[in-house]
Image (tube, rainbow, N blue to C red):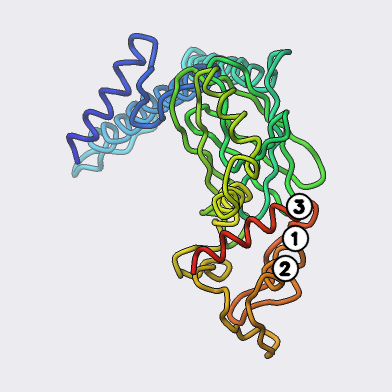
Amino acid sequence: MLGQVGSGLAQLVVPALVGQSSTGSFWLPPPDSVASGAVDHAFHFVMYVSYFFFALIFGLIVLFVVKYRRRPGAEAVKTAKSSLALEATWSLIPLALTIVMFYLGFVGYVELRSPPERAYEISVLARKWSWQFTYPDGTIDNNLHVPVGEPVRLVMTSDDVIHSLSIPAFRVKMDVVPGRYTRTWFQGKELGTYDLYCTEYCGTGHSDMLASVVVHEADDFRAWLKAAGDVLGNNPPAKAGEILFRRHGCGSCHSTDGTPRVGPSLQGIVGQTHAMADGSSAAVDENYIRQSILEPGTKIRQGFRNQMPTYKGRLNDQEITAIIQYIKSLN
Ligand code: CUA
């Protein structure tokens, strides 16, 4: 444990001393986006200044407690006088430090708020509890795929409540609000897969509201986009259904292995008869699944709440048929 902290501190101090930190540190993941450096500089500066004053202030407290403690025979004497030099010192030094902090923060903020003119634009839709990324050609995926070395702008909105998109490795975090669009941008520097989180508590499934950011080589990205574009044409129905199920984030609420989550598991449900919350019962067939996708409020399983958003207008009939095929294949 101590060794971990030690190597963490070394990782932290050494890059700061040599002025770069490409491997990440004890506190921060690798800064793999172009604007990450500015955030890290501000963070490290504030942290080292805090370390210094923490040590100085607590050191003096301990020193004074020992040195000026009450002892038998010692008399209390008041010798304090005002000192302009001392007061100016402890006012001007913090002033200078906070100006530097403001400057570092402001530079980073401006960089994070101003995407370059020619950025690749991806629409983001957040809903309870999944992410949906729509590419310029209409392809939809629940993970964010981007080309390396190209600025990417996200234009984001929410279907229900306030969510927040955060990609720690890119030092990007922005609220996603219903009824308006917010924007953020980044430019991946390294190939790889990164975590994307929702960082605004948005209900039961908040902690499942995860996605990956996959940074591809430019050519691989175009190839991925081409293959991902025509799911129904490129796959047999059950497989296409599985891809659509994943893309639309169905899996964050419905497991396929029998475990109940926010919603019931879909394993083996076709052909079963389920008790409903209103006391009735219903047999699960194609029409039941279709109705549950388009009008999720009409039949609520016993033990679950009416939480699912409708997919009317988001999935067409062919796609719904493919998803039904996939759910049947789970039997
Ligand atoms: Cu969406 Cu938390």
- Asked if residue 181 is positioned above or below residue 41 in the image, the reply reads below
Residue drawn at (41%, 25%), measured in percent from left and top?
A: 30
Image-quadrant location for residue 92: top right
Q: Which residue is mark 3?
A: 316
Looking at the picture, which amino acid does disc 2 mark?
Answer: Pro
Question: In which quarter of the view is residue 325 placed?
Answer: bottom right
Q: CA distance from mark 2 to mark 3?
A: 16 Å
* Circle 1 SS class: loop
Q: Are marks 2 and 3 in contact (CB under 8 Å)?
A: no
Residue 234 seen from this side: yes
Residue 11 picture location, percent across and down: 29, 23
Q: Nearer the viewer, mark 3 or mark 1?
A: 3
- Percent x, y of residue 330: 49, 65
Of 77 and 52, the residue lying toward us? 52
Q: Label 3 CB, ligand 1: below 8 Å?
A: no
Q: Position of residue 225 (x, y in %)?
A: 61, 29
Give the mark nearest the N terminus, 3 or 1: 1
Residue 310: which disc?
A: 1
Which amino acid does the dot numbered 3 rest on? Asn
Classify mark 3: helix, strand or loop: loop
Do tag 1 and tag 2 residues touch (Cβ < 8 Å)? yes
Viewer-closest of 324 and 281: 324
- Residue 1 in the image: above or below residue 289: above
Q: Secondary structure at mark 2?
A: loop
In the image, farthest residue toward the bottom: 279
Q: Residue furthest top?
A: 18
Task: Read off the residue under disc 2.
Answer: 296
Q: Nearer the viewer, residue 291 or 87?
A: 291
The Cα–Cα distance between marks 3 and 1, rounded to whole angstroms, is 12 Å
First in sequence, mark 1 or 2: give its number. 2
Q: Is mark 2 within 8 Å of ligand 1?
A: no
Q: Earlier in the sequence, mark 2 or mark 3?
A: 2
